[in-house]
Image (cartoon, helix red, strand yellow):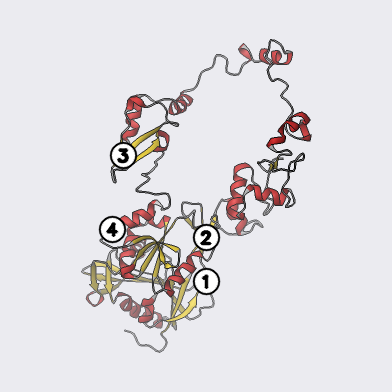
Amino acid sequence: MKQKKCLICHEKLTGKKLSNHIKKIHNLSSKDYTIKYLYNNKEPVCLNCGGEVRYSAYIFKKYCSGCSLIASKNGGKKGGKAKAWNKGKTKKDDERIKKQAESMMGDLNHFYRKSHTKETRNKISKTKLLSRVKLATRVKERESEFTLVTDLNSYISRQRQYLEFECKSCGHINKKTLQAFERGSLCEKCYPLSRSRFEIEICNFLEAEGVNFKASDRTVLNGKEIDILVSDYRIGIEANGLFWHSELNADKDRYYHLMKTENMLKNKYKLIHIFEDDWRDKQEICKSLILHKLGLTKRKVYARKCIVKELSKKEEIDFFNKTHINGFAKSRKCLGLYFKDELIAAMSVRIPYQKKYKDTIEIARFSTALNTAVIGGLSKLLKKISAYAKKEKFLKVLSYADRLFGEGDGYKTCGFSYEGNTGLSYWYTDGRVRISRFSVMSVDGKSQKEVARERKLYKVWGCGSNIYMMNISQQQYT
């Protein structure tokens, strides 16, 4: 019987979607699910000999392969399928087949005197054998990556024939069908299946910067893998793909990223998490952040040589969107550091969203220009912000440090005290981008989870943030 919903969570799904849902969400094979929920935890056996029977699409056969003849004789509901009534017959010797054939002849046939449209002909041409000219054109589209080794004259099939392509980066000969090649299949040596494309791009970036690192290290965490380990600086980098690091992957629970971060800290290493969408959409910010964490930022400017100015809203938006991993955030005031008329650092503040923080102002954003280290920049801007806060009758300054990128040690040196952490953070993802949990809210009596499932969104977890607080009520600032 066709399954129309999951019997565990009652989500309405059928076919392959249901099988994938059972495997990814409930961590069960479709066979185990069938035994447990459709056969009361008892796997059926052959009715004749008691042997193992074949499973297919939520159904177990009644007889094993050795007893299949019995099933064929019984037919119908008693087991197996009855012999086909029309087997071996034609319209010449069977009236029913003859009647059916005559009903489809000439004008009665839906396709009689009809031809394919231009659109369907184009679709068919892509699956049929290509001309040598078209084949050469399609190969040329990726000539910067591969060279076709196979002789064009020996081409016979787009989907079933393996052609040889030489990778221009490493010289490795890849065997691919033309269909796989057209869809963007990568070099199997440059991009092995065990490593994501953007993880390898991060490795290539580090290599270009002259950084020594080890990929897929399992020594620091006793067998657990760190994607990229930079031992010289005691830094680890995790490349987190959105699909594989979401709740769809049963191997990575909600605490996976946090526990890795804390276990690395126990071994006196710091861990940076780079998510797939950040690397794809904000790559320059990610590169600047990585170099800063490694202490390899080439440009250094001293804050004492800078002057402080208040930013207009347009200047604030432009600066944070270009330099901060989370972009611009609404604020009450924003101050910037200028070096020779160039804006090289900025800090914005706002009223905390959480009502429990009374008489407190919160740092919304702080960042420096890309690939620029501003020595003393945080401290200088904090002094000006604190002076403003005291004038406005605030008693404390609050800040959060996202543990995806560090522990916020710079705040301690500026007089902040550690107040704890927020607990786990999370987003929703469609597999391509992360979406704020605040944009997936309960509505019309549906829970947030139900709304997310309808939109085919799944949770991806962060590490939370450390909370820092500075008391300014007794301090003097000018």
Q: Nearer the viewer, mark 4 or mark 3?
A: 3
Nearer to me, 149 or 197: 149
Q: Please, which residue is most extreme toward the top here? A: 92
Between the residue at mark 4 and the residue at mark 3, the CA separation in whole angstroms equals: 23 Å
Q: What residue is at 70 percent from the left and 49 percent from the top?
A: 35
Cα separation, mark 3 vs mark 1, equals 49 Å
Mark 2 vs 3: CB contact within 8 A: no
State yes or no: discs 1 and 4 in contact (Cβ < 8 Å): no
Report the residue marked by disc 1. 423
**Rendered image quadrant of residue 378:** bottom left
Separation of residues labelled 2 and 3 (CA atoms): 36 Å
- Image location (x, y in percent) of residue 77: 78, 34
Give the mark nearest the N terminus, 1 or 2.
2
In depth, the one of 143 and 170 nearer the eye is 170
Viewer-proximal residue among 120 and 236? 236
Residue type at numbered disc 2: Lys
Going by the picture, which residue comes out furthest to the bottom?
A: 474
Q: Which quadrant is home to the C terminus?
A: bottom left
Disc 1 or disc 4, which is closer to the eye?
4
Q: Is label 2 in a helix, a strand or a loop?
A: loop
Q: Which residue lies under the disc numbered 2?
A: 252
**Residue 2 sits above or below residue 108 on the image:** below
Query: Along the horizontal axis of the image, is 236 left or right of 87?
Result: left
Q: Residues within 10 Å of mark 1 (few under 14, many from 20)?
A: few
Outermost residue toward the left in this view: 340
Q: Under tag 4, what secondary structure?
A: helix
